Each structure stands twice: as C-alpha cells, then as structure tokens.
Amino acid sequence: MTATATSVGESDRTQPQRTPASRLTARLRSLLPAAAALSGVLLYVSFPPRTLWWLALPAFAVLGHVLRGRGWKAGLGLGYLFGLGFLLPLLVWTGVEVGPGPWLALVAIEALFVAAVGAGVAAVSKLPAWPVWAAALWIAGEAARARVPFDGFPWGKIAFGQADGVFLPLAALGGTPVLGFAVVLCGFGLGEAVRLAVGARRGARVRRGAAAVALAAVAVPVVAAVAARPLVSDEAQDGTATVAVIQGNVPRAGLDFNSQRRAVLDHHARETERLAAEVDAGKADRPDFVLWPENSSDIDPFANADARMVIDRAAKAIGVPVSVGGVVERDGKLLNEQILWDPDKGPVDTYDKRQIQPFGEYLPLRSLIGAINGEWTSMVSRDFSRGTEPGVFTMAGTRVGLVTCYEAAFDWAVRSEVADGAQLISVPSNNATFDRSEMTYQQLAMSRVRAVEHSRTVTVPVTSGVSAIIMPDGRITQRTGMFVADSLVQEVPLRSVETPATRLGVLPEIALVLVAAGGVGWAVGAGVRGRRARDV
C-alpha cells in the first residue's frame, strides 16, 4: 500500500503545473470561436439600412487578432464562424417567403468561401506586412464568390456596406475590389497597431518595420480616399435630362404578388396617368422620359392586346418614351425584358436581362432538386433565358443603361452599360417578393456605390419601394416609401466621362488576386523550409 501511494505521488509531481499565465492563454483560446462569430455579426451591423459603415474596421481588426499566428486548419474553422456571423443575418431576407431551408443552405455554402479566406489569412499572418496579404486574400475570396457556383453571388461585398463611408471615392478609382481592399486593409492594420501598442506597454520589443506597416495600413487607405475625391462629381457634362421614376405598388407582398399580374400593370399605368395629369395641370415638371420597374407588366404585351392597350394608353398620356419591365416569350424563350415604349410607335427596342437569378429565375440541377423537394420545381416551373447584349436605350436623346435588379450586384453587368455609352443608369427592380426586409436597402446601397464607381446618375424604379434617384456622387436626392404608389421627377446631370474604375475594368481585381496568391505562395514556401530545417 505504501509503495503504491508513493508511486502515485511521484507521478503527480512529474505532471506539468499550469501557471496562471498558461491558464489565461487557454481561456483566451477557448473564446476565439465566439470572438470570430461576433466579429462577423459586427460586420453585418455595418451594412445598410444602418449607416454604421465604420464598424467594418473593428470587425476586421478582431478577425485579424483571432487568426494571427494560427494554423490553417484553425483559420478554416474560425473563418467559417466569421462567415456565419456575417452572412446569416445579412441574407435572412432570402428565406422571407420560402422558409429557412434555402436561406441556411445559401449561407452554409457562401461561408465556405470565407472559411478558405480565414485559412489563407492565418497562413500569411506570419509574414512581414501581413495585413496587405490578408486584405488581398479577402478580395480574392469575394472574386471567387462572385463567380461560382451558378455564376456567383456577390451579395455582401465589403464595398456594398460603404455607401455612407469616407472610403467611397475609391470606387471611382478601382471599383468595388479597390474600395473593399482599402476597408479590409485598414481594419487589419488597425488591429495590428493596437496589438503592437499593447505589447509595447507591457514591455515587449516592437520592431520598427512592423509598426510602420501597421500605421501605413491604417493611413494609406484613408489618404487614398481623400486623394480620390476629385474623381467624384455631379457636374453635368452632357447637359441634363428630366427623368420620372414610377412606383406603382403591388396588391400584396410575397411570392403571390404575381398572381395579380394585371393589377400590378394597372397600378403602374394608373400612377403614370396620375403624373401626366399633374404635369398637364402645371403641378409637376414634364419628364423627358419615364422609367417603370422590373415586372411592372408580367403580362406579355406582345402577345396580349389588352396589356398592350394599357401600356400604350399610359405612354400616350405622359407623351414621352417609357421603359417598361415585362415578362415576354419570344422564339420559345421566356425573357425578363425591358421594353422601350414610344408614345406614338409603341415598342421600339428591348433589353433582355443577362444575369438571371438561380433558384428565382431558373433552377440549376432541376432533376436533382425536384427529387429532393418538388415544391421548388413548381415555384420555378420554367427557366428564364439569358440576354446576350448590353441594354442602352436612347430615350429623348439620352443614353440610358439598363441594369435589371440582381445584375446591379455584378461589376461586369454595370460596367458594360457605361462602356456602351450610357449617360445615365437605371436599375429597375422588383423587391415585392422580399416584403419589408433589409434586401431593398442593401440593393439601394449597391446602386449608390455604382453611381460613384462610374460617375453616373442612377435611378432605381422599384415595384413596391424603395425607389430612388441617386446623383453621380452617391447622394440620394429623392426616395419613396415602401408599399406606396408614388413617382419621382427630377432634372439630373448627364455624364460621359469614364472613371479609372470604368477604364481599368477587371484589372484591379486581377492584381489583388495575384497579390493574394503571392502571399499564400510565400507562406507555404516558408512553412516547408521551416519544417525541413527542423527535420535536419
């Protein structure tokens, strides 16, 4: 008995004793998952309809602290938690009418891209100037997410949360990739600066190079944004045009608003005729042209004489060209189409939506999804076809570029209209499906960023709101409420200048992806060399 007791006691004394410092370190590590998720939530709060754009900086500062020095596997998991914290609340509107299943599936897939970025950031965090590599990695993740799967889903780009922020002028310099890179870099730099400052107060040795990089990562984006201010202007280069934006409203929100297609058409025709009466009475300025939203006529006016008559009557009442959002069938294809309607000649031009929405306008993997849930195949009973050409209507002498709803999230779709000569951009949309969710405000912020990116007035005609008129400097000058019939009339500047972002196109994004690849390659190479040195 005595011998056994002695052996056990000696064994206990050989166990390493945990010091208070080691216990604190273990406790802090156990909090990392919660910190990752909560910093993702903080990033979500920085997005519209709130104007707390600056919260993106502490969100990335915390993320940088969480990932710094971790292994890639830990970075993968922590990045996924950050992605869930950000995207779960941001995209909750996708399940407003169809239930939580599609929303949760979408978030689970999209968060994988953030997880991959987290693994990459953890790897490059051991390199000199790591905030630069890490910020480029975030943009590389956004670039991938905007392209795959099913042609991508760019919703939640960091740039789209910065419509009210000081970094917004950078959109004109290099588009959404440069704007997003600046915000993320500043956030990571802020976190690194705080870490070094805390270390210095505790007596740790801080290398000058590391401190200089951290401060530069914070200062350079801010200075660049100030320097880019001259690129932002609302001066009329090509004169002005008086535009009318029509919001006719819908009978009811939700997926079944389409069951009253004639009522939706009547609402938009009625609001146009009401505006015409005000113009004739001298109570409103006469517009040069009128813009209706997407799905304002889901009855094909080329096949239905009654729908054609309703639109024709409204166009004749206002007496100027009208862009009508219709659903039409042509050559056996179903198309989401904008129709240029002349008050004298009727339909004279069309634009077919090119970036159609998966699971909304077409159903990928139809047979597989039908086997899992037949309701999806009934909800999207027939796939829309894609347009192939940019849509720029000449309306009363003004070149109006059409970017239909979902297309506003895609850099190429907006840029192509400006490159094709658009002096003004219209983003006709239908948000009635998503009720009063944050979706409409998130999409409105995208249009504000696009206005600055390409230095164009942007109009947003929406079936149920929020419709708006946005100046080339990103300011909203008029807007409607939600689920009301209303119209906006305003003289707006026309511009033809091409910003650096328009001219450079996808090149800034490619450059940042290459920077990210270089950082990952350097980190992997350093890790291999380190393991070989230890083996020797």
Image (cartoon, rainbow, N blue to C red):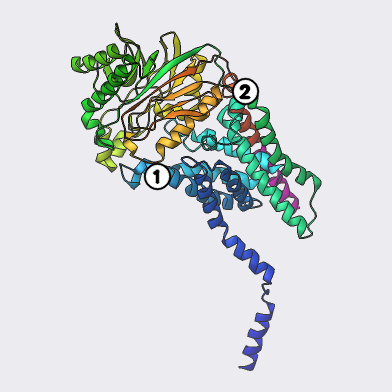
**Snapshot quadrant of residue 281:** top left
Give left or right: position of 374 versus 401: left
4 is within the stretch colored magenta: no
**Who's the residue at 78% across and 57% down the image?**
204
Q: Which residue is mark 2?
A: 231
* Residue kind at label 1, given as amino acid type: Val
Secondary structure mostly taken by the magenta-highlighted segment of the chain: helix
Q: Position of residue 497 (x, y in %)?
A: 57, 15
Closer to the camera in the image, 89 or 322: 322
Does label 1 or label 2 sit earlier along the sequence? 1
* Eye-nearest disc, 1 or 2: 2
Q: Position of residue 352 (x, y in %)?
A: 36, 19
Regarding residue 535, the answer to whether it shows in the image is no
Q: Which residue is mark 1?
A: 92
Give left or right: position of 43 versus 124: left
Q: Residues within 10 Å of mark 1 (few under 14, many from 20)?
A: some
**Who's the residue at 41% across and 40% down the image?**
438
**Snapshot quadrant of residue 460:** top left
